[in-house]
Image (cartoon, rainbow, N blue to C red):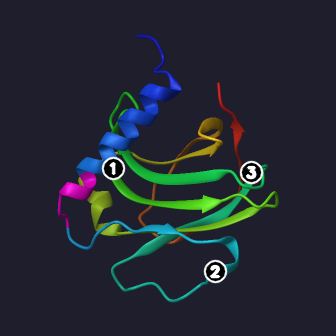
Amino acid sequence: MKNPTPLQSLILLSLIALLAACTHDGPPAATTTLPQAQITTAPLPAYQRELSGSLLNVPSGADVELALLAVDQRGRPQALLGNIQLRGTGKPLAFHLPFNPDTFSKHSRIELHGRANQAGRLILRLPAQAITQAETQTLGQLRLAPAP
């Protein structure tokens, strides 16, 4: 089976986001778009946990999306558990991605995915990061790779 093209991946992720928005599985997955200066470390609601860290080599003005996804055995997205959108500053880009830990028990494999677009073109992607625990975690510095 051939690898999906970036356009096919984008369409699939968009469809999953749309499907996730149409379902109701307890508190909604968080979607946040904040300038870097407005990100705060406010206490999380009791039902949420978060992934945090920083993204390296994101150019200034690039639009970045991080998504926490449940994936099947073949790596295909099955459910969107949380996502955030950020704007690159040219410096390490801190992120805080909230999610509901109750959704982990419904899925066998959870991964963090990311991508960066500039001028409507995919320029970078985050290699899939396996997330094995439904707990608040600091992932450290994650480097985005050039998109194929």
Query: First in sequence: mark 1 or mark 3?
Result: 1
The image position of residue 63, as x and y in percent, is: 62, 52
The amino acid sitting under disc 3 is: Val
Along the polypeptide, which appears first: circle 2 or circle 1?
1
Structural crowding at the residue carrying mark 1, measured as other residues with C-alpha within 10 Å and reported as few (<14), some (14–19) or many (≥20)? many
Question: Which residue lies at the image location 36% right of the left edge and 34% below the top edge?
Answer: 12
Q: Position of residue 132 (x, y in %)?
A: 46, 54
Badge 2, how many Cα within 10 Å: few under 14, some, many 20+? Answer: few
The picture places residue 30, in percent across and down from the top left corner, at 39, 68
Residue position marked by numbered label 2 in the rendering: 38
Taking the spot 72% from the left edge, 62% from the top edge, the residue there is: 93
Decide which of 41, 148 is in the foreground and name it: 148
Q: Which residue appears farthest toward the front when viewing the image?
A: 119
Spatial CA distance of label 1 from label 3 is 23 Å
Residue at the spot 81% in from the left edge and 57% down from the top edge? 90
- Left or right: 117, with 46 as reference point: right
N-terminal of the two: label 3 or label 2? Answer: 2
Mark 3 secondary-structure assignment: loop
* 23 falls in the magenta region: yes
Circle 1 sits on which residue?
A: 17
Stretch in magenta: 20-25
In the depicted structure, whether residue 60 falls above or below residue 137: above
- Quadrant in which the N terminus appears: top left
Residue 85 point in image, percent of width and height: 54, 60
Q: Secondary structure at mark 1?
A: helix
Residue, disc 3: 58
